[in-house]
Image: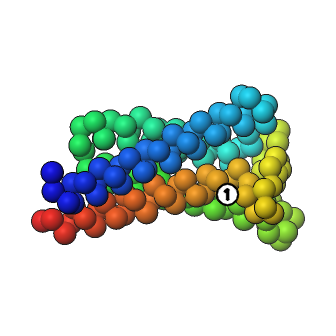
Amino acid sequence: MNKNQTKLDMLLFISWAASLIATLGSLFFSEIMKYIPCSLCWYQRIFMYPFVVILAMAMVKKDYKVYSYSIALSGIGLVIALYHTLLQKVPFLQENSLDCGIVPCTTDYIDWLGFITIPFMALVAFTIIFVCMVYMRKLIKEEK
């Protein structure tokens, strides 16, 4: 096993672990803590949940080309999570936000250390996946 393959395997594992932790965390908050997800939380889930299966299959099959669609999916999720985080923390955006459904998207169920919210945690997970996939693409392109 060469050095690059070890790096690629580690990047896949880190991405998969981030998606698994994010998925389990969101299920914990909604099913155990009974926090009702807002509309933006549902969109973030739509983009996060498939990563658990996609990246697990990529690890088993050693399919390093998973980056080609993972960059797009994680990028979209990242933008949604960034917007949701800003919506919760920037007063100007809160004043001009649209109705988000049963639960307003500005609801802070948790606010650890003054900045760690559920959308912020999703933002971190999407960023980890995005950065790992971009780095994976770079490593594969260098091998050619």
Image position of 116 (left or right of 142): right
- Residue 81 position within the rendered picture, expressed as x and y whole percent measured from the top left: 63, 56
How many numbered discs sit on the rendered protein?
1
Quadrant assignment for the C terminus: bottom left
Q: Vertically, is 59 above or below 87? A: above
Image position of 87 (left or right of 91): left
Q: Secondary structure at mark 1?
A: helix
Residue 11, visible in the rendered structure? yes
Choose top left, top right, bottom left or bottom right for residue 103.
top right
Image position of 116 (left or right of 11): right
Choose top left, top right, bottom left or bottom right for residue 102.
top right
Q: Vertically, is 30 above or below 95? A: above
Q: Amino acid at mark 1?
A: Phe
Image position of 3 (left or right of 82): left
- Residue 88 position within the rendered picture, expressed as x and y whole percent measured from the top left: 78, 60
In the image shown, does 67 or 62 lie closer to the viewer? 62
Residue 96, visible in the rendered structure? no
Residue at left offset 32%, top offset 36%: 57
Residue at left offset 21%, top offset 66%: 141
Q: Which residue is mark 1?
A: 120
Q: How is the image coloured?
A: rainbow
- Residue 123 position within the rendered picture, expressed as x and y whole percent measured from the top left: 60, 57
Residue at left offset 81%, top offset 63%: 114
In the image shown, does 18 or 51 lie closer to the viewer? 18
- Residue 124 position within the rendered picture, expressed as x and y whole percent measured from the top left: 58, 58
| Residue furthest left as drawn | 144
- Neighbours of disc 1 within 10 Å: few (<14), some (14-19), many (20+): many
Residue at left offset 28%, top offset 36%: 60
